[in-house]
Amino acid sequence: MDPMDCLVIYVPTAAAEAVRQAIGDAGAGRLGNYSHCSFSLEGTGRFTPLPGANPTIGVVDSPEEVPETRIEAIYPRSRRSAVVDAALSAHPYETPAFMTFPVDTSLPRR
């Protein structure tokens, strides 16, 4: 089995469904006989656009708070480029906040 990684990405809540769909279509969230599996949590994103930024939301040099959704989904490591590219393509921000890391999805011996 291909090693698995996890994507965590923060997205404005209004765009969360589009990002979930895009990463699922790219191969994230496949678990057994299921596809498009993910976990989401609502929160508040905070940022200040710096000079040179072209913010989707807010204005340069002004702190901003936005309702955001944290999306988590696992994917085969071999699909990393496709999953991350899909997430970034569907994301409305100029510089999306995301991380990826390896995960152990093996089941304990029974």
Image (cartoon, rainbow, N blue to C red):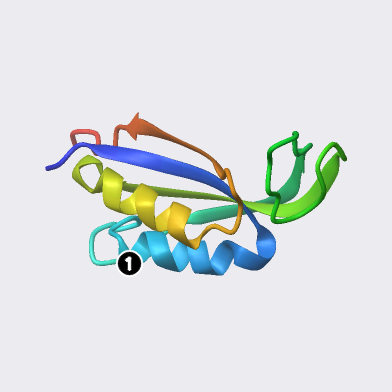
Q: Position of residue 71 (x, y in %)?
A: 53, 51
- Number of labels in the image equals 1
Query: Which residue sits at x=57%, y=54%?
Result: 40
Disc 1 residue type (three-letter): Asp
Does residue 35 appear in the picture of this structure?
no
Foreground residue among 109 and 57? 57
Q: Position of residue 11 (x, y in %)?
A: 61, 53
Q: Position of residue 44 (x, y in %)?
A: 77, 46
Q: Is residue 73 left or right of residue 4?
A: right
Q: Is residue 33 above or below residue 5?
A: below
- Farthest residue in the front direction? 52
- Farthest residue in the left direction? 1
Foreground residue among 109 and 55? 55
**Residue 102's image quarter?**
top left
Mark 1 neighbour density, 10 Å: few (under 14) some (14–19) many (20 or more): some
Q: At numbered mark 1, what does the secondary structure look like: helix, strand or loop?
A: helix
Q: Is residue 82 left or right of residue 64?
A: left
The residue at which mark 1 appears reads as: 25
